[in-house]
Amino acid sequence: MKIVVAYKWAPNPQDASVGVDGAVDWSRAKPGISEYDPVAIELARRLAEATGGEVIALTAGPKSVDASMARKAALSRGFDRAVIVADDALEGAGTTELAAVLAAAVRHIGDVDVVITGDSSVDVGAKMVPTVLAGQLGWPAVAEVTAVSGSDPAAGLLRVERAITGGTQVLEITGPAVLAASTDAAVPRVPGMRDILAAGKKPVETLEVPALDVPASGTTVTVTATARPDLKARKGQLIDTADPAAAAAELVAALRADGAI
Amino acid sequence: MSINIWIVVAGDPAVGNLIDTARSLGGQVCAAVVGSRVVADTVAAGGVDKVVWFGEPGKAPVEAFATAAADVIEATPGVVLGASRASDRVLLGAVAARLQAPVLTAPSSVSAEGDTLVVTRSIFSGIAEETVTVSGPVAVVLDGGPIPVANPAGGSALMEEVSAVTLGMTVVETHSSDFEQVDLGAAPRVVGIGRGLKAPGDLAMIEALAKASRSEVACSRPLAEGLDWLHKDRYIGVSGQHIAPEVYFAIGISGQLQHMVGVRGATTIVAINSDPNALVFTEADYCLVGDLYSIVPALTDALR
Ligand SMILES: Cc1cc2nc3c(=O)[nH]c(=O)nc-3n(C[C@H](O)[C@H](O)[C@H](O)COP(=O)(O)OP(=O)(O)OC[C@H]3O[C@@H](n4cnc5c(N)ncnc54)[C@H](O)[C@@H]3O)c2cc1C
Ligand SMILES: Nc1ncnc2c1ncn2[C@@H]1O[C@H](COP(=O)(O)O)[C@@H](O)[C@H]1O
């Protein structure tokens, strides 16, 4: 099987700073592999181990996604090779544009049986890239996937388990398909020293957007205003907990005085 | 708006908020409904002008109709609204791809100015907000809201049944597990517990506090996804529930952005954490630095 994992190289908004005008400054936020994408990688490796086949890393973003540290961080996680679309034209690209680029890259790779993604990216967190990607390819998509196996890999049949409200469901899917892993689908392996050393020797194909066949959007989106959310001012009152009973009494009294309980 | 307004429905008729939002834009509202006839009828009676229904799904999951939904909407593209649930996102994603339409999430307001759509939305897990004007087809993901109430005057939208070519997907097994449904949004007080809790058995202590303070129990994401100590509908945050209770007790929760964004509407936040530098203290009204295992029982006693 040819398995592609789409991972994002992105910073955590927790580490960004936001000006009073709502401008986001990412300079102190260090990018990394998006928090839940290692779960997708783990699902892909299990599938590859069970069915044979290769696991290909795929990411798209500005040039920084192809930095040597970024490459190593991905390749040390057990990929056979990587395809990286690195183009500064993708700085700030939206969900649909990114998904269109990823779809074009999947077509470029060719004969892909399944694309596995994370649940949501750490920065944008729309949970939409996988579904738009599937739409671009005309493939089935399933989110909240908890397990995947090849029920009849030769026939391109996938057995996919997914979480639904109050339960689980097993689907049989004629691939190729795009599957978004639930955050708790698997516990990712931590790369060891050997993996990190091996990462440098894995093949990487770097592409720019013009090399791919990416359809254009006819919609224009114009940002007319940005703002910092208006957060409630908090009291930040410290209650001494040396004596838990006294602390509890003080808190209860304060909450009663506020009319909160 | 003179452009087309669509809502996509993925087997779950809890789309009241989509209908209200679509209506407020002031145009014809069409619904593309995947699911049973009952779902289609509920949507048809709930205030849309027209329903396109794809027929009984049988063993095909909702997602199998993604291409069919895109085919229908492509004929009269416009503003397309979908709920943030997993299957709804798959349908909306297929439509957005077909229209090459941008996707906007987490809106706090959606309105129309002539034929442009104006959306104010929260971005990057809520650290900032932006207002955008959009001209051309666009997909907007929002909270589905409740099941729409049938128009009291009676009458229902025009229903058109179309036959759909489905993608190769079949449901082969469904397992349901019992869980107690809870409306955290309606609870005046919520006790939220995080990874500071050492063992699932210790939830009894948290439940005792919840009982004494007449609160519902909620949690951070890792407790519901990964540890499975609480059901998924009980976790709070950017990808979970957003609540605005009178009091939120954040216990053994570090207070990372992705969690806190779900409780920022709380009137009062109480934080209990053993780490004096925990982020949660920067967003709390009452800060108790210490071991939750000694503070929680004391607090439960004080409330009794
Ligand atoms: C895209 C994305 C979306 C996410 N969405 C959500 C979401 O919707 N909701 C959500 O909750 N998270 C979400 N997260 C995860 C979030 O970033 C945090 O990882 C998570 O909220 C941390 O949970 P926690 O505070 O329980 O655990 P930790 O961060 O591990 O914190 C545990 C805390 O317990 C304290 N503690 C330990 N022992 C004790 C004790 N004995 N007494 C008192 N305190 C103690 C520690 O000091 C620590 O602060 C998301 C992440 C990403 C990347
Ligand atoms: N630029 C990207 N390159 C590769 N994969 C991505 C990219 N953006 C998102 N993804 C994948 O899509 C998932 C959901 O992202 P999002 O829709 O941004 O929440 C992520 O967990 C990744 O697996």
Image: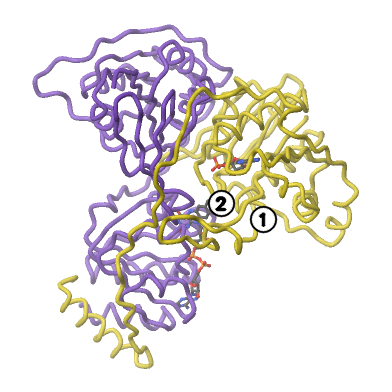
Q: Is residue B50 positioned above or below A102 on the image?
A: above
Could you tell me which quadrant the C terminus of chain A lies in? bottom left
Q: Amino acid at mark 1?
A: Gly
Residue A134: x, y in percent? 59, 27
- Tag shown at residue A122: 2
* Residue beneath the point at 71% across and 22% down: A156
Tell whether label 1 touches label 2 (CB within 8 Å).
yes
> Which picture quadrant has residue A51?
top right
Residue B40: x, y in percent? 30, 19
Q: Residues within 10 Å of mark 1 (few under 14, many from 20)?
A: some
Residue A81: x, y in percent? 83, 40
Q: Is mark 2 within 8 Å of ligand 1?
A: yes
Residue A137: x, y in percent? 63, 22
- Please report, as a chain letter, where disc 2 is located: A
- Please report, as a chain letter, where disc 1 is located: A
Q: Which residue is mark 1?
A: A32
Q: Nearer the viewer, residue A91 or B195?
A: A91
Q: Are marks 2 and 1 on the same chain?
A: yes
Chain A appears what colour?
yellow
Chain B appears what colour?
purple
Q: Is residue B74 positioned above or below B88 on the image?
A: above
* Residue beneath the point at 26% across and 81% down: A251
Secondary element at image label 2: loop
Q: CA distance from mark 2 to mark 1?
A: 9 Å
* Residue beneath the point at 28% across and 14% down: B50
- Tag shown at residue B283: none
Mark toward the start of the polypeptide (2 vs 1): 1
Q: Nearer the viewer, residue B138 or A135?
A: B138
Q: Is residue B138 positioned above or below A165 on the image?
A: above
Secondary element at image label 1: strand
